[in-house]
Amino acid sequence: MFRQLLNWRVLLALLAIIIVSGTIFYSQYLARKIARDERQKVEQSIDAIKFIINAPSDADITFATKIVTGNKSIPIIETNEKDSITQYINLDTAKTAKSISYVEQKLRLFKSQNKAIEWIDPNNPSFRNLYYYGESKLLNEVRYYPIVQLCIVALFMAITLLSLRSSYRSVQNQVWAGMAKETAHQLGTPVSSLEGWVEMLKENPDSKKIAHELEKDVDRLRLVSDRFGKIGSTPHLEETNLVSQINNMVDYMRKRAAGKINFAVNTHGQQQIMSKVSAPLFDWVIENLLKNALDSMEGKGAIVTDIHEDDKSVYIDISDTGKGISKQNITRVFKPGFTTKKRGWGLGLSLSRRIIKQYHKGDIFVKHSEIGKGTTFRIVLKK
């Protein structure tokens, strides 16, 4: 799926490059053609104006007048031999009426856009005019068209990529849910069989102690199976006292921790901190974080769980004195498959994040980590 998404990105990028390149070349071709046509129109307008001015009283100026009045889109400014503005056409009359500086600004702009057209009086060569002209609205639209199209193509690519990404996530979620449910299904049969054997051991007085301990492990397997079975389904959230819930999980891990590991739970004197959670899934998250903390320490150190709240949220910080996480790995710890352990699939933190963010609408992240000093993970839940 990732390769398909990558191929789609490459194809979309190539398609965008081809479309934009073709548009730029063609629009520039059109712009040059329109610019040539507009210069010819300006030259024709100037010739027509001079013909009307110098024509005898009995001359037919109808055609020349049509040429002059026909230009309604190209702005023109006329200057004399001293480069002083003498007249202009097709400028904003409201702005020209308010200030001559507007015309002067336009003159500077026209000088930068196009080469002036010079007209010399054939009867008096010392008398000459320069005609500066700007770009018509049509020419500006053609010039800016590639930018507009580029924005449209970029928007199209963004929407398409978001759609593909959403599809990829949907497939990924289905794979996660399918794998979890299949795991729960596969665990179901041997767990049921083990429960039967435990009941048989209980009937033997000499095996009661073994049966009791074995029953704990079977119950644990049943809990794990139940957790996997809930992945992909909408969990039932119940109002739960997180203090007692977390304490139970810490006690469970304390009994199974090897070496000299000190566990502590800090509730700031509160006996009850309530939030709606799915107890089996929430326990799984706490267990994953505690196991990671244990794995980061070499049989000695401390794991402190701090629980506190404000008006809107509950905050759970799980800190250890282990190896810490490097800066380049902090952004990767929640990605599926990432692990620094010799064993493991690298799915624990990924599943934990999914449980907290997707099912509990909360957040989980690395609050702080320092190499050689330890790591703090934070869980944020709504009250």
Image (cartoon, grey):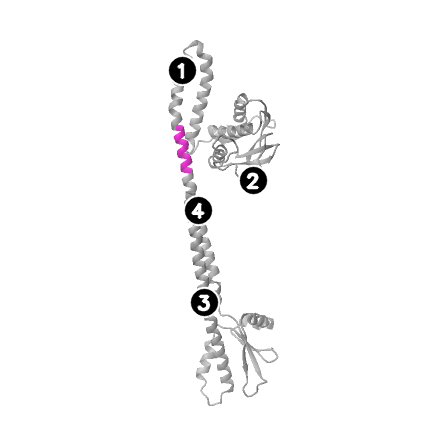
Q: Position of residue 164 (x, y in %)?
A: 42, 46
User: What stretch of residues is rendered in magenta?
Assistant: 173-184
- In this view, the mark in front (4 or 1): 4
Which of marks 3 and 2 precedes in the sequence? 3
In this figure, which residue is indicated by the disc labeled 2?
A: 328
Q: Amino acid at mark 2?
A: Gln
- In this view, the mark in front (2 or 1): 2
Q: Main secondary structure of the magenta part?
A: helix
The answer to whether any part of residue 290 appears in the image is yes
In this figure, which residue is indicated by the disc labeled 1?
A: 199
* Disc on res. 327: none
Q: Are marks 2 and 1 in contact (CB under 8 Å)?
A: no
**Whole-Å distance between the Cαs marked 2 and 1?**
51 Å
Which of marks 4 and 2 precedes in the sequence? 4
In terms of secondary structure, where does tag 2 sit? helix
Q: Position of residue 290 (x, y in %)?
A: 54, 28
In this figure, which residue is indicated by the disc labeled 4?
A: 6
The answer to whether residue 358 is left or right of residue 369 is: left
Which of marks 1 and 2 precedes in the sequence? 1
Q: Position of residue 7 (x, y in %)?
A: 42, 48
The answer to whether residue 261 is left or right of residue 7 is: right
Crowdedness near tag 1: few (<14), some (14–19) or many (≥20) residues, C-alpha within 10 Å? some
Quadrant position of the N terminus in the picture: top left
**Whole-Å distance between the Cαs marked 1 and 3?**
88 Å
Which of marks 1 and 4 precedes in the sequence? 4
Crowdedness near tag 4: few (<14), some (14–19) or many (≥20) residues, C-alpha within 10 Å? few
Check the image and name the residue furthest to the front.
342
**Whole-Å distance between the Cαs marked 2 and 3?**
50 Å
Residue at the image position 40 percent from the left and 19 percent from the top: 195
